[in-house]
């Protein structure tokens, strides 16, 4: 049984939490402060050749995963994101495939591809979280 008022509060609380986490990682990606480097290093390989020169804290894929998560969670604060679990998974799949194929040495991804798949993956992640009720 769902309690409408409680669900709204949980959605808002979850959105605020995701906004905060996303903001920390986006800040870390662009500013690369020394105090965040251990956290950034846990979540990303941080290889310079896979990063944008203007965002040295994270690779391009991770940077835009968190940018996508940040903006999608901002939208979640005000309204329910359209989509379903299936849509969320389909949006995450290109990021997972691009990263996996590159890791296996099948091809070398470009920063533009990492940007696009990362943003799609971050947005899909939020849709997946919100659709799981």
Image (cartoon, rainbow, N blue to C red):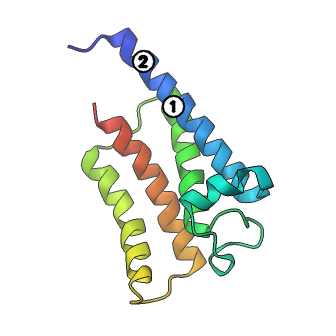
User: Which sits earlier in the primary sequence, circle 2 or circle 1?
Assistant: 2
x and y, in percent, of residue 78 in the image: 52, 27
Residue at 48% in and 29% down: 14
Q: Above or below — where is 71 with respect to 56?
A: above
Q: Above or below — where is 27 with respect to 79?
A: below
Circle 1 residues within 10 Å: few <14, some 14–19, many ≥20: many
Does residue 33 show up? Answer: no
* Of residues 81 and 95, the one drawn nearer to the viewer in this rendering: 95
Q: For residue 15, which numbered disc appears in the image?
A: 1
Residue at 52% in and 75% down: 113
Q: Is residue 77 shown left or right of residue 88?
A: right
* Of residues 101 and 121, the one drawn nearer to the viewer in this rendering: 101
Circle 2 residues within 10 Å: few <14, some 14–19, many ≥20: some
Residue at 46% in and 50% down: 123
x and y, in percent, of residue 5 in the image: 39, 9
Mark 2 secondary-structure assignment: helix
Tag 2 near tag 1, CB within 8 Å? no
For label 2, the residue is 8
x and y, in percent, of residue 33 in the image: 79, 54
Does residue 20 show up? Answer: yes
Which residue in the rendered view is the most extreme toward the front? 38
Q: Quadrant of the C terminus?
A: top left
The quadrant in which residue 80 appears is top left
Which residue in the rendered view is the most extreme toward the left? 1
Q: Above or below — where is 49 with respect to 79?
A: below
Q: Above or below — where is 106 with respect to 47?
A: below
* Of residues 26 and 79, the one drawn nearer to the viewer in this rendering: 26
């Amino acid at each position: 049984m769902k309690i409408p008022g409680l669900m709204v509060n949980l959605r808002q609380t979850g959105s605020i939490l995701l906004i905060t986490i996303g903001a920390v990682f986006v800040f870390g990606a662009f500013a690369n402060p020394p105090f965040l480097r251990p956290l950034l290093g846990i979540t990303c390989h941080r290889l310079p050749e896979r990063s944008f020169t203007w965002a040295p804290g994270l690779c391009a894929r991770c940077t835009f995963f968190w940018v996508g998560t940040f903006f999608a969670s901002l939208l979640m604060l005000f309204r329910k994101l359209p989509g379903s679990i299936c849509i969320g998974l389909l949006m995450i799949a290109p990021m997972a495939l691009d990263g996996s194929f590159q890791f296996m040495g099948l091809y070398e991804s470009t920063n533009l591809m990492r940007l696009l798949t990362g943003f799609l993956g971050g947005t899909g992640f939020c849709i997946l979280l919100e659709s799981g009720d």
